[in-house]
Image (cartoon, rainbow, N blue to C red):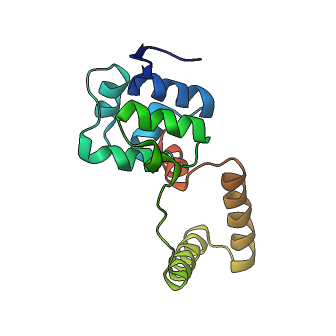
Amino acid sequence: MTHAKTDLVDTFAAVLRDIMSATGLKQNIIAHMLGVSTKTMGRYFNEQAVPPVHRRHGIVHAFRDLPPPLVARVAASLGVSADFATHLPHRPIDPEHARRVVLEGLNDVMERLDTGPLRTRRALGLFLGRLAAAKIDPAAAQALLETK
């Protein structure tokens, strides 16, 4: 389902609505993914504002896990080069840093839930596997957990 278009290019608001329809994500989750307030996101949805030029590449990058045609629409609606949308840069992960972060998080969860490492690792592994299978960004999952 496509909403308003201007000169054959979707408006950013129309693309955001289609992203919500396709993914089931709510405005507050998308706002969190983009690093903007819910008030700013409301302005984007109501076509009262568009993202500033210096944030547009980052916004396209935030949606990099969506289907490529949808990412291309995001890029086009923001006036970002189609080349950028198809060759999104990914920062290489430092394995040692990732290991430290995961172990610190694991220890924190074990302490808070008063469980042992085997049960905690198994439960977190299942949780992370479900997120990955559903292609849900951890930041979006965090925002969902924080909503009441």
Q: Residue at x 35, y 32 (%)?
A: 41
Residue furthest top as drawn: 4
Instruction: State which quadrant residue 38 falls in.
Output: top left
| Residue 97 appears in the figure | yes
Q: Position of residue 39 (x, y in %)?
A: 29, 31
Task: Give coordinates of residue 45: x percent, y percent.
Answer: 38, 24
The answer to whether one can see residue 35 in this image is no
Residue 126 lies, with reference to residue 50, above or below; the image says: below
Front residue of 80 and 136: 80
The x, y position of residue 22, in whole percent, is 62, 30
Where is residue 73 drawn, in percent x and y? 49, 32
Q: In which quarter of the image is residue 13?
A: top left
* Residue 57 drawn above or below residue 41: below
Q: From the viewer's perspective, is residue 141 above or below residue 128?
A: above
Q: How many discs mark residues in the rendered view?
A: 0
Q: In which quarter of the image is the N terminus?
A: top right
